[in-house]
Image (tube, rainbow, N blue to C red):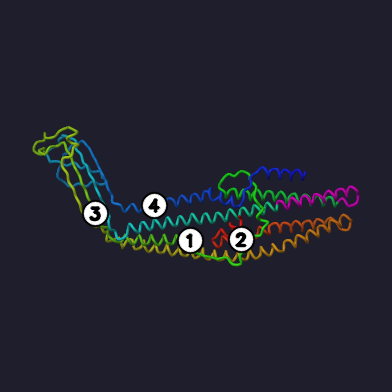
């Protein structure tokens, strides 16, 4: 039955695609939603840089209006709140009349804030710093996700190796169980030995089932990080049997660490926003130019002759009077510095808070580097000791098995030797994996994923 089960696993493995760690990382970077989101934000911010540069261009407006209505008017003040007032202009009569004609207005307007003590320039700098911040956020998200995917892949490899060891353990336990059953039926050993053998076999089967369940869970965890439906797949475990090439001393450059670069970009953005707020203290110099033509169906003698108007559209639509205007002006809200001084102070405190967050992240990374060094040293020690432990446990198990076959020991000792062997084999299986995990942690702390990724080629 176990043989059939094993053959089934072999068949499935050949019918599925193999997903290497390198391919998994590339697939995740292309498809994971959070990375796509960060990229979208970066692209949006970059477009805002272009938009802020174009805001310095002058406003150029063209207007052409044709309308029909009366022009009754009277003396008195008026103000069009919210643009709700009509601009009807005409002579003042002693009573209402309903004489109506066509009118027109053709207008070109240019308004340019040509000098504002750096407002436009600083606004562009703020937009650029936001774009840089969002791009750094995108880069650090890619870096973090590469580490997450690599860690999940290594966890899956470890689960797969443990699964294989538990399969061998089940086969080994089953062979002992079959031997005990035959000897018990022959009366060579006590019947309780067969019970103990069956219990050991049952325990080995439970361990295998739990290991299979853990492997499936690790596979689901990896699939979620890939951001794409890959279906069922096999993993590549060939690299894990080799020791990565380790350096005695790895170079750490905080200026190139993706996470720290992102934190620095947040501080830079806050500082630029404070500078931009300060530019709002100062006045704005503007140039304005207006050219207009007007047409009207009311004649020049309409004030004295109320019949001097026409209903002809063309007479009202064609231009009859033109005007132009050019000017320069300055606008300065002198209370602006008083109001904005607290906004500038608040922004500086914001920068201080971001600086402290950077300091915390820097300290955490330095601590992570020390942890990575310790894990690497411990992983290498375990890697060197694991074969010794396996050999000793294997010798113990073989010895107890031979002694049992010759009636010189009991089933309890055989079972204990089996437990010792499977524990030694599992320690050996994850020893290499722990070295790779330590190298990944080292790459993460140094901010250089290539330290780990280059080992995969």
Label 3 to label 1: alpha-carbon separation:
42 Å
Task: Determine the secondary structure under disc 2.
Answer: helix
Label 4 to label 2: alpha-carbon separation:
40 Å
* Helix, strand or loop for the magenta stretch, by majority: helix
Q: Give yes or no for residue 186 being in the magenta stretch.
A: yes
Of 290 and 189, the residue lying toward us:
290
Label 4 to label 1: alpha-carbon separation:
21 Å
The magenta stretch is: 163-191
> Which residue sits at x=17%, y=38%?
296
Label 3 to label 4: alpha-carbon separation:
25 Å
Q: Is residue 302 left or right of residue 31?
A: left
Task: Determine the secondary structure under disc 1.
Answer: helix
Q: Identify residue for label 2.
A: 439
Q: Identify residue for label 4.
A: 48
The answer to whether residue 203 is visible is no
Q: Identify residue for label 3.
A: 287
Task: Determine the secondary structure under disc 4.
Answer: helix
Chain-order first, disc 4 or disc 1 = 4
Quarter of the image for residue 128 reads: bottom left
> Which residue sits at x=77%, y=60%?
391
- In the rendered structure, are the residues bearing label 3 and label 4 in contact, judged by CB atoms less than 8 Å apart? no
- In the rendered structure, are the residues bearing label 2 and label 1 in contact, judged by CB atoms less than 8 Å apart? no
Q: Identify residue for label 1.
A: 261
């Amino acid at each position: 039955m176990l043989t059939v089960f094993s053959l089934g696993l072999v068949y499935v493995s050949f019918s599925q695609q193999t997903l290497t760690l390198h391919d998994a990382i590339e697939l995740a970077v292309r498809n994971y939603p959070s990375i796509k989101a960060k990229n979208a934000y970066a692209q949006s911010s970059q477009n805002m840089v272009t938009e802020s540069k174009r805001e310095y261009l002058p406003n150029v407006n063209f207007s052409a209006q044709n309308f029909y209505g009366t022009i009754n008017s009277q003396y008195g003040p008026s103000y069009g709140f919210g643009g709700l007032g009509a601009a009807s202009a005409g002579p003042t009569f002693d009573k209402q009349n309903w004489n109506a004609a066509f009118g027109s207005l053709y207008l070109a307007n240019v308004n340019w804030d040509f000098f504002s003590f750096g407002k436009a320039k600083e606004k562009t700098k703020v937009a650029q710093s936001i774009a840089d911040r969002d791009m750094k956020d995108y880069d650090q998200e890619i870096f973090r996700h590469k580490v997450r995917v690599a860690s999940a892949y290594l966890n899956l490899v470890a689960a797969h190796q443990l699964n294989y060891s538990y399969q061998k353990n089940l086969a080994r336990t089953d062979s002992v169980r079959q031997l005990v059953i035959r000897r018990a039926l022959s009366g060579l050993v006590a019947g309780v030995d067969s019970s103990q053998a069956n219990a050991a076999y049952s325990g080995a089967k439970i361990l295998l089932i739990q290991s299979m369940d853990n492997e499936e869970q690790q596979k689901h965890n990896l699939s979620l990080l890939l951001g794409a439906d890959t279906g069922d797949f096999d993993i590549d475990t060939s690299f894990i049997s080799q020791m990565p090439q380790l350096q005695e001393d790895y170079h750490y450059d905080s200026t190139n660490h993706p996470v720290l670069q992102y934190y620095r970009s947040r501080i830079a953005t806050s500082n630029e926003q404070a500078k931009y707020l300060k530019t709002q203290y100062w006045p704005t110099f503007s140039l304005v130019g207006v050219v207009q033509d007007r047409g009207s169906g009311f004649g020049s003698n309409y004030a004295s002759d109320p019949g001097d108007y026409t209903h002809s559209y063309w007479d009202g639509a064609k231009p009859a009077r033109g005007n132009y205007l050019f000017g320069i002006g300055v606008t300065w809200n002198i209370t602006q510095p008083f109001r904005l001084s607290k906004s500038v102070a608040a922004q500086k405190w914001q920068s201080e808070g971001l600086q402290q967050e950077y300091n915390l992240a820097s300290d955490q990374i330095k601590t992570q580097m020390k942890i990575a060094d310790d894990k690497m040293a411990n992983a290498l020690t375990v890697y060197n000791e694991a074969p010794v432990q396996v050999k000793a446990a294997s010798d113990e198990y073989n010895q107890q098995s031979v002694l049992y076959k010759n009636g010189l020991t009991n089933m309890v000792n055989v079972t204990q030797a089996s437990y010792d062997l499977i524990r030694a084999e599992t320690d050996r299986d994850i020893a290499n994996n722990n070295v790779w995990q330590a190298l990944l942690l080292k790459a993460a702390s140094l901010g250089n994923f290539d330290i780990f990724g280059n080992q995969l080629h």
